[in-house]
Image (cartoon, grey):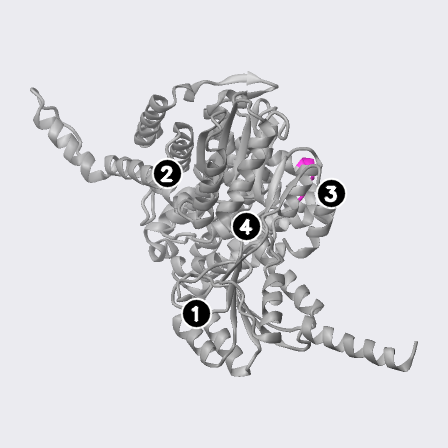
C-alpha cells in the first residue's frame, strides 16, 4: 500500500469538509499576503491545529504500541506553567524551554515506567498523571494565570517565520522529523511489533521495555511542545485550562487518521490529517456563525460521518455493492 | 481631661467596639476550592476581612466536592462556631445540613452562589447580580458610542452556564432600543484566554479582517485579554479600532487598560465576605435579620480610573 492510498480517506474527508465549510463561509480558502505574513482562515487552521497535531504525533506512537496516553493535556499544563514561571523569574528563553521540555520528558518517563516496568495498564497508568498533573501545574502557578511579557517566548506562539505562523512550523518540523526517524530506520517497525505482540517481539530480541518507555517519553516531549505553543500564544500559563480535554482530541485525531487503537501499523501523516480535520471543523463552525449551543453537536455529527465512511465494514460493503452493479465485474481484492 | 470624661470616653469606646464588632467570634468558611484566580482572591479577601474585624476564621477548602463541604459544615457545627460562610459548589443537596445548622442556631451566610433550599434555612446570601453586570457593561457601550453605528461581537462564557446566560441577557437589555448597536457575532470562548483568542481570530476573519467590528463584549476579562492579542496580531489597535468591554476586573485587564488596549470592565468583587460580616455583626448585636439577598456593587472601571493603581492593588490578592 503506497502512502497515497493509505491517506486517501483522510485527504478525501478533509477536501469534502473544506468544500462544506466553503458553502457556509465562501471566503474559507482565500489567502492574502499582508504585512509580511499570510492571512486567511486556512492559515488559522494550520496555526490553531498546532497543539492537537503535536499531541497526535506522540499519541500515534503510543497507540501503535497498543497503549494510550491520557495525560498529555495535563503535561501541557505542567510544561506551560514551568516555562512561564522560568521566563517570568528572568531565566531567559533557552533555559525556560529546556525546563519545559525536561518536565515533559520526565512526565513521559513516569508514564513509561508505570506501563513498561511496573506493568500497569496504560489507560490507568496515564490516568494517574491526567488527574494529578493539573494539580501540579496549579501548584506551579499558585492557581492564577501566570502572565509574562517576554517577546521571544511570545514569538513561538504568535510569531511569523517566512510568512507562516511559527506554531505551524513547529508541528510541521516535529511531525516530519519523527516520521523520518521511525520510517527511515527500523524503529517504526519495532514499535509496531511491540504493539502487535509484546511478548513475541521481546522473544525476537526487541527491547520492548526500553521501547515502551521511549514512546511515552516522546509523547511527553510532544505534549511539552504543545504546552509551550499554547502558553506562548496567550502569553500566560493558564493551569486550569491549558490543554484541557486535548488528550481526547489527540486520540480522535489518531483514530480519524485510520490508526487502530489495538496497536500495530500506524501512520503519523494520517494522524496529522486527522488533527487538521478536527481543526477545520472547529474553525468552520466559528466562521459559519452558528449559535454556540450547536458547536459540539455539529462537531460530533461530522466526526461520526467521517468515521462511518472510513469504517472497514462500510468500505467492504461498498466495494461489494459496486462490484455487483458492474456490467463486467473485474477481479478485485476485497480489503 | 477630668477623670469623669475619661471614664465616659472609655465606656463609649467599649460600647462602640461591641456594637461595631463582636470581637473574638469564630466563623467557619467552607470555600469551593481554588479553581480560578477570582476564587483565590475571594479566599484572600475573606481572611483579610476577618482579621480586620478581629474574627477568628476557620477555613476549609472543599476541592470542588460537595461532600467535603457538607463534612466541613458538620465539623463547624460540632465545634459550635458563631456563624458559617458557605460558597456552595452546586445548588442542590444542602437541605439536611442547613437544617442541622439551624437546629444548632448557627447562622449560615451564602457567598457568591445560591442554593435551591428554602430561604429560611440560611440567614442571607451575598452575591453579585449577573444580569446587572451585563447591563452596566452594555450601558457603558451605549454611552460611549453616543448614537453612532456600532457592530458588536460577543464572546460568551461557557455555553449554558448561568454567568453566560445572565451576562448576555443584561447586555441585551442595556442595548435594547438603541438600534445603532447590533450584536453581529456571538460565540462561546468558554471563559478562557486561549479560546477567547481563537474565537476572536475567527470573528476578525469573518468581519473583513476586523474593519467592520466596532466593539467587543466579553463575558469575562480572561477572554478579553486573549481577544486583545488577536486584535493586535491582526494589525488593529484594541481599545481604539475596536472597543473592548468585559466583566470581572481581574488584574490583567487593568494592565491592558493602562496600556490603552482595553476600555472598560465591570467589577465582580471578590470581597463577598465584607458585606457578610457586616450582616452577621448586626445579627449578633441585636438579632437584626438582613435581606435574603445582599447585592454587591457592580462597579464600572474605565481607563480614567487609574488602571495602573488598580492593578497594583489587586495583583497581591492571588488572582
Query: What stretch of residues is rendered in magenta?
Result: A148-152
**What is the chain letter for disc 2?**
A
Name the one closer to the observer, B130 or A127. Answer: B130
Answer whether residue A225 is visible to the viewer in this image.
no
Residue at coordinates 58% horizontally, 17% vertically from top-left?
A34
Answer whether residue B231 is visible to the viewer in this image.
yes
In the rendered view, would you say A265 is above or below B270?
A: above
Image quarter of the N terminus of chain B: bottom right
Name the one closer to the observer, B198 or A154. Answer: B198
Residue A150 location, x and y as percent?
69, 39
**What is the chain letter for disc 3?**
B
**What is the chain letter for disc 1?**
B
Nearer the observer: mark 3 or 2; the answer is 3
Instruction: Give me the C-alpha separation between circle 4 and circle 1.
Output: 43 Å
Circle 4 sits in a helix, a strand or a loop, which is it?
helix
Nearer the observer: mark 4 or 1; the answer is 1
Mark 2 residue crowding within 10 angstroms, few (<14) / some (14–19) / many (20+) = some
Q: Do residues under tags 2 and 1 come within 8 Å of each other at their CB atoms?
A: no
Q: Which mark is residue B120?
A: 1
Residue B67 location, x and y as percent?
43, 70
Tell me whether marks 3 and 2 sit on the same chain: no
Q: Which mark is residue A280?
A: none
Does the segment drawn in magenta span residue A229?
no
> In screen coordinates, is A88 left or right of A165?
right
Residue A120 location, x and y as percent?
41, 63
Mark 1 residue crowding within 10 angstroms, few (<14) / some (14–19) / many (20+) = few
Instruction: Kindly identify which residue carries mark 4.
Output: A77
Instruction: Give me the C-alpha separation between circle 4 and circle 3.
Output: 29 Å
Residue at coordinates 46% horizontally, 77% vertically from top-left?
B102
Instruction: Kindly identify which residue carries mark 2.
Output: A295
Instruction: Kindly identify which residue carries mark 3.
Output: B308
**What is the chain letter for disc 4?**
A
Amino acid at each position: 500500500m503506497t502512502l497515497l492510498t493509505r491517506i486517501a480517506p483522510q485527504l478525501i474527508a478533509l477536501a469534502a469538509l473544506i468544500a462544506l465549510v466553503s458553502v457556509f463561509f465562501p471566503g474559507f480558502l482565500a489567502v492574502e499576503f499582508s504585512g509580511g505574513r499570510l492571512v486567511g482562515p486556512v492559515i488559522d487552521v494550520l496555526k490553531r491545529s498546532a497543539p492537537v497535531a503535536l499531541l497526535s504525533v506522540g499519541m500515534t506512537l503510543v497507540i501503535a504500541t497498543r497503549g494510550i496516553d491520557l495525560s498529555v493535556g495535563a503535561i501541557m499544563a505542567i510544561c506551560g506553567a514551568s516555562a512561564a514561571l522560568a521566563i517570568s523569574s528572568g531565566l531567559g528563553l533557552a533555559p525556560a524551554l529546556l525546563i519545559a521540555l525536561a518536565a515533559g520528558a520526565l512526565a513521559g518517563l513516569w508514564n513509561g515506567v508505570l506501563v513498561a516496568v511496573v506493568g500497569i495498564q496504560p489507560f490507568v497508568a496515564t490516568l494517574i498523571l491526567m488527574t494529578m498533573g493539573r494539580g501540579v501545574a496549579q501548584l506551579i502557578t499558585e492557581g492564577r494565570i501566570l502572565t509574562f511579557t517576554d517577546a521571544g517566548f511570545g514569538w513561538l506562539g504568535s510569531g511569523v517565520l517566512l510568512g507562516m505562523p511559527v506554531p505551524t512550523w513547529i508541528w510541521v518540523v516535529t511531525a516530519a522529523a519523527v516520521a523520518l526517524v521511525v520510517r527511515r530506520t527500523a524503529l517504526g517497525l519495532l514499535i509496531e511489533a511491540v504493539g502487535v505482540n509484546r511478548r513475541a517481539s521481546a522473544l525476537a530480541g526487541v527491547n520492548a521495555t526500553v521501547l515502551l518507555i521511549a514512546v511515552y517519553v516522546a509523547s511527553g516531549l510532544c505534549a511539552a511542545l504543545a504546552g509551550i505553543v499554547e502558553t506562548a500564544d496567550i502569553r500566560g500559563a493558564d493551569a486550569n485550562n491549558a490543554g484541557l480535554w486535548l488528550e481526547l482530541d489527540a486520540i480522535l485525531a489518531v483514530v480519524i487518521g485510520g490508526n487502530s487503537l489495538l496497536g500495530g501499523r500506524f501512520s503519523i501523516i494520517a494522524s496529522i490529517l486527522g488533527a487538521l480535520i478536527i481543526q477545520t471543523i472547529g474553525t468552520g463552525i466559528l466562521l459559519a456563525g452558528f449559535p454556540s449551543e450547536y458547536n459540539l453537536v455539529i462537531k460530533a455529527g461530522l466526526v461520526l460521518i467521517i468515521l462511518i465512511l472510513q469504517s472497514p465494514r462500510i468500505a467492504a460493503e461498498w466495494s461489494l455493492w459496486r462490484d455487483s452493479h458492474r456490467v463486467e465485474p473485474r477481479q478485485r481484492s476485497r480489503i | 481631661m477630668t477623670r469623669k470624661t475619661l471614664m465616659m470616653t472609655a465606656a463609649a469606646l467599649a460600647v462602640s467596639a461591641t456594637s461595631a464588632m463582636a470581637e473574638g467570634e469564630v466563623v467557619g468558611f467552607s470555600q469551593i476550592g481554588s479553581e480560578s484566580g477570582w476564587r483565590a482572591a475571594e479566599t484572600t479577601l475573606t481572611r483579610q476581612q476577618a482579621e480586620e474585624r478581629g474574627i477568628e476564621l476557620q477555613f476549609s477548602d472543599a476541592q470542588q466536592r460537595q461532600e467535603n463541604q457538607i463534612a466541613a459544615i458538620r465539623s463547624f457545627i460540632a465545634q459550635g462556631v458563631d456563624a458559617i460562610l458557605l460558597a456552595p459548589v452546586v445548588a442542590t443537596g444542602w437541605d439536611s445540613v442547613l437544617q442541622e445548622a439551624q437546629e444548632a442556631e448557627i447562622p449560615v451566610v451564602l457567598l457568591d452562589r445560591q442554593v435551591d433550599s428554602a430561604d429560611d434555612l440560611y440567614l442571607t446570601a451575598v452575591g453579585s447580580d449577573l444580569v446587572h453586570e451585563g447591563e452596566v457593561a452594555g450601558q457603558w457601550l451605549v454611552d460611549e458610542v453616543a448614537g453612532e453605528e456600532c457592530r458588536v461581537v460577543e464572546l460568551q462564557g461557557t455555553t449554558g452556564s448561568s454567568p453566560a446566560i445572565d451576562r448576555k441577557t443584561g447586555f441585551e437589555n442595556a442595548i435594547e432600543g438603541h438600534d445603532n448597536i447590533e450584536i453581529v457575532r456571538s460565540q462561546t470562548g468558554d471563559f478562557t484566554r486561549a479560546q477567547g483568542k481563537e474565537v476572536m481570530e475567527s470573528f476578525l476573519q469573518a468581519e473583513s479582517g476586523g474593519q467592520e467590528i466596532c466593539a467587543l463584549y466579553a463575558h469575562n476579562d480572561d477572554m478579553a485579554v486573549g481577544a486583545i492579542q488577536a486584535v493586535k496580531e491582526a494589525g488593529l489597535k484594541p481599545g481604539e479600532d475596536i472597543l473592548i468591554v468585559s466583566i470581572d476586573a481581574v488584574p490583567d485587564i487593568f494592565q491592558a487598560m493602562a496600556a490603552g488596549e482595553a476600555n472598560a470592565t465591570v467589577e465582580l468583587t471578590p470581597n463577598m465576605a465584607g458585606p457578610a460580616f457586616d450582616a452577621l455583626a448586626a445579627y449578633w448585636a441585636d438579632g437584626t435579620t438582613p435581606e435574603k439577598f445582599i447585592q454587591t456593587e457592580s462597579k464600572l472601571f474605565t481607563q480614567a480610573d487609574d488602571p495602573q493603581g488598580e492593578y497594583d492593588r489587586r495583583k497581591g490578592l492571588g488572582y
